[in-house]
Image (cartoon, grey):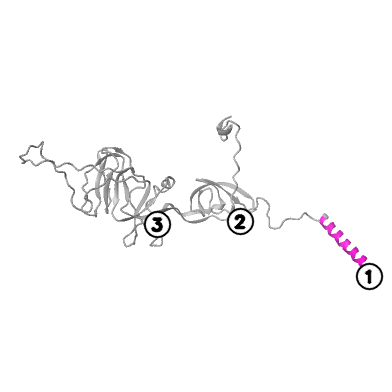
Amino acid sequence: MRGRLLLGSCVLLLLVAAGAGCRASGPEAVTPGLAARGTPLTTAKPARQDLDNRVSLAGRVTMNPLFGVVAPVAGQIRYRDVDPPEGTPTRPTRVASIWAGGKSRRVDVPSGSVFAGRLMDDRSTVTAGMPVVSARRIGYGLVAEIDGAQAYQISDSLTSVQAQIKNGPGPFACKVLGTIAALPAGTVPEPPAREPSADSSADPSTAPVAPVRPPAGIHQQVEPSEPTGMRLVCTAPPGIKLINGASATLEVVTARAENALVLPVEAVAGGQGNGKVDVVGPDGGRETRDVVLGLSDGKVVQITSGLTGDETVAVPGPNLPPAEPAEPGQPGRPAGPMGGK
């Protein structure tokens, strides 16, 4: 029995020694699952697809919303006297003209809306696109308030708006009314006084002057329009059921590109027009290449130049090197706290 124990102990010692010898003489252990630094783990090929940029706005169904009408050209504005309508206008209403170079251009309030006020003094010089008249849509409209950043994104892209009523109809095309610019309070001139009749025997200096009364109708008196912030106002097609106060989402297509060359956003470093990608060669090496960027929908980004479309690109994209610190007092880094020394 004692001999067996001694023999087992000797065998165990030999195994331990052999294992120790293998570890000492073998190669260094490599942690599984980790690739060498800089090795591209995923690649992507440029593809082609239609692409557009969209901005979503929170809106609401509103009755009789106010909107602005802009000057079609630069020039001098000359307002017209506008009588209150006897009903909802079925044709555009001419409310002013812009004179430039001896020619005039009409300023019309669209059909279905009424004149609400002048936004400028008569014979003022205006620029193209400046709000000059406020108008009020008769009936339902969809209104979304806009902040400054959104205004610059969508100012030139109001031709394509889709609306979705929360828990209601949609999406449907929503026709934009007027401009998105903020409006000052609009003013309406007083109606001219009626001259006394020529055959009156009374003294003209003491005869009462009867004011001109607007025709009877839905708008017997036009109230000055209130100021507004920047807003988008649009109308739904006929047959769409709207409920005043219902929440809605308005989606504006700000730009569109057809058959655009695109890459996943993860493959591109940079933004705002310029970027970099790592092109992977047949041997697995990387070449960082400058590219010019276009539209992006958050998933892919358009490559307008810098690639032919046949390349293989590493994902993720290259890491941009940090900016080198500037010498004290040089541009790029202040000399001390708050720019002091």
* Residue appearing at x 16%, y 41% in the figure: 193
* Amino acid residing under circle 1: Met
Quadrant in which the C terminus appears: top right
Residue range highlighted in magenta: 1-23
* Amino acid residing under circle 3: Ala
The answer to whether residue 193 is left or right of residue 171 is: left
* Amino acid residing under circle 2: Thr
Q: Give the CA separation, mark 2 to mark 1.
A: 63 Å
Residue located beneath label 2 in the image: 42
Which callout, 3 or 1, points at the residue further toward the start of the chain?
1
Find residue 146 and report its horizontal and vertical position in percent.
40, 48
Contact check, label 3 and label 1, Cβ < 8 Å: no
For discs 3 and 2, the disc positioned in front in the rendered view: 3
Residue located beneath label 3 in the image: 248
Find residue 134 and report its horizontal and vertical position in percent.
30, 46
Dot 1, crowdedness within 10 Å: few (<14), some or many (≥20)? Answer: few
Which callout, 2 or 1, points at the residue further toward the start of the chain?
1
Per the image, label 2 sits on a secondary structure element best described as strand
Residue 96 part of the magenta-drawn span: no
Q: Does the magenta stretch mainly form a helix, a strand or a loop? A: helix
Residue located beneath label 1 in the image: 1
Per the image, label 3 sits on a secondary structure element best described as strand
For discs 2 and 1, the disc positioned in front in the rendered view: 1
Find residue 160 and report its horizontal and vertical position in percent.
38, 54
Dot 2, crowdedness within 10 Å: few (<14), some or many (≥20)? Answer: few
